[in-house]
Amino acid sequence: MKRLDWIVLGVCILCLYAVIQIRLGCFWNFGSIENADAVNSIIEGLSYSYIAAYFFYLLTVFLPSRRRRKKIFPIIKERVHEIGIRNIHSILLEFGRGTQLGSDYRDVQHTEEIMRSKNWDSEVPMFKKYDGVSITHFRYADVQCRTIQDRIADIIIRYSEVLTEDEITALEKFSKNQYFTLSLSLSSHPTMQVNSGIDSLIEAFIKMQKEFIDVECLFGIES
């Protein structure tokens, strides 16, 4: 349930409580209030109206939305998981060239050990074909990062009606990860910044891995 749904439910419970108390004669029914009956009558009428409106909301909005989420959520989970097995996986393989780095983007500890033990001082930017254009592997990582951001934006826009506020916030936060900014910087001057910026890049990449794992856990994606 979204936060607004909880608020609406809370108000409905208060209205139901008010009706019960008024019917029992113990709600705002004080001798010092001359128009207590009139006040009670107004509150009772408003409460009945709100409760009726709430049940109408349940039948026409909330329950259909829940059914839609149940139907679509597996697709959302698959699209989120694809970011890991395609894009993050690709970045991992690209920067792991020449090492024993595996392809499991969830193995954060192994990734950090391998990336920190790699001899980046002698690293010569390799070239790769992407859409027919030769680019360094830093640029390749930047393209993957932009693809990740585009995929996340598409998920949020396409499925905003069924995503919870926590899910949307987690996706938006991940799309603004520091690694994406550093990747763009290094892709512009890979040979100049590889020595001075690689430690920051590794730290940001590890942080990105951890945050994406948290996102997957939020969506119920198991390893």
Image (spheres, rainbow, N blue to C red):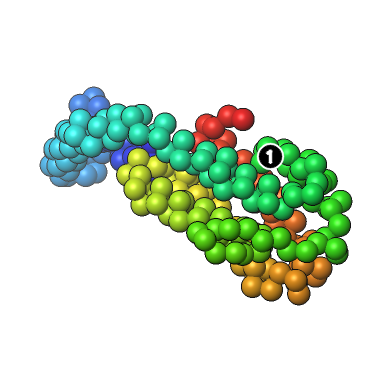
Seen at 57% across and 35% down, the residue is 217
* Residue 145 shown left or right of residue 206 in the figure: left
Q: Residue furthest top?
A: 24
Badge 1 amino acid: Ser
Outermost residue to the front: 132
Residue drawn 33% across the image and 29% down it: 71
Give coordinates of residue 16: x percent, y percent: 26, 31
Q: In which quarter of the image is the N terminus?
A: top left
205 or 165: which is nearer to us?
205
Task: Give the residue at x 57% y 40%.
Answer: 85
Decide: few, some or many residues near mark 1? Use Cα within 10 Å; few <14, some 14-19, many ≥20. some
Where residue 73 sits in the image (x, y, percent)? 40, 34
Residue 72's spot in the image, x, y percent? 35, 34
Residue 40, compared with residue 169, is above or below; it is above
Q: Is residue 177 visible?
A: yes
Q: Nearer the viewer, residue 10 or 84?
A: 84
Residue corresponding to mark 1: 103
Residue 171 higher or lower than 189, as above or below: above
Task: Classify residue 133 as left or right of residue 33.
Answer: right
